[in-house]
Amino acid sequence: SRKSWIPCSAGHGRVSEGLSWERDGADWPHRQASRFVVASGMRWHVQQWGQGPTCLLLHGTGAATHTWRDVAPLLADRFNVVAPDLPGHGFSEALAAHRQSLTGMAAAISELLETLDARPTLAVGHSAGAALLARMALDGCIAPDTIVSLNGAFLPFRGVAGRFVGPLARLLAINPLVPRLFAWGAGGGATVERLIRSTGSSLDARGAELYGRLLRNPVHVAGALAMMANWDLESLKRQLPELKARLVLVACGDDGAIPPEDAFRVRDAVPGATVTYLRHLGHLAHEERPDLVVAAIVNAAH
């Protein structure tokens, strides 16, 4: 495939008000593993480590490659680890509005992998990243042997939340003032700490600072809102039983974002799926205890 690389030192910041690689990425975790790649009509920030069979890491809504800062080096002993910032997140550009769906984003990531000449045999996704991996596998974009879901967001919200979260996210996403207001509100460290605590996780000061850096940026916030607004999990739920890859669901007992029982519901729907249950960890378990999560990933890959 034709590869289009942009050196990370080449002065490529984000568009107006977006994150700047020179400023916001100056001390980004594993900066030396970063590169910018043009694929699917946009510029991606990608980090890559190690050698061996390819392991693809996809972060969840509102995060970026920093979320894998302690996981990726441990996996790099066994794998060629590839971790992009999702469209509209971190230092990656956003997709056009008509492509900001689950299917559209899956296709764009597929084109990125083609440009990288990467064919993952193992795919690991956190939260919404797990749903993206399932969509990609169902659409024939990837054919991994195993998909590992870390607190995967596969199922639509239930009850009242299910009727309002999607429409609300769409309304917020089309109002250009909302990302600015949210970013302004996240300016204080206390707000970020409350958001992290609400996930059931406890992070160190470095982790909290990195999330704060992202959430204070209106372009990153707009990317997260657009992703939420265009998420079609009903179709994914119906098709999950057709998944060919082996699905390993890591569920955490203190997850405040995705009920751990959702993993068991998905397990019952997908032939051959299994659940690894980790007590006393929250939604960001891979940042709290990367050693336990990497052990679960490596065990799943065998």
Image (spheres, grey):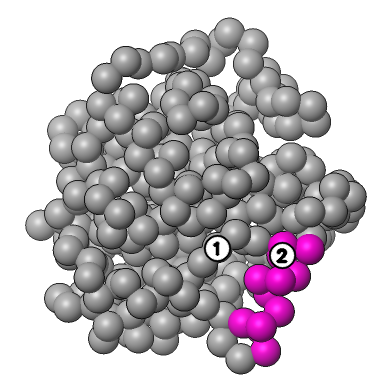
**Which residue type carries mark 1?**
Trp
Against 268, residue 140 (above or below) is above
Percent x, y for residue 71?
38, 47
- Say which quadrant the C terminus sits in: bottom left
The label shown at residue 143 is none
The answer to whether 115 appears left or right of 5 in the picture is left
Percent x, y for residue 64?
55, 43
Percent x, y for residue 272?
15, 76
Against 43, residue 89 (above or below) is below
The label shown at residue 169 is 2
Which quadrant of the view contains residue 299?
Answer: bottom left
| Helix, strand or loop: magenta stretch | helix
Which residue is depicted at the point 32% across and 43% down? 56
Instruction: Work out whether residue 113 or residue 22 is closer to the camera in this orientation and state it.
Output: 113
Percent x, y for residue 258?
51, 76
The label shown at residue 231 is 1
Q: Let me know if residue 162 is in the magenta part.
A: yes
Q: Magenta part of the protein: which range?
A: 160-171
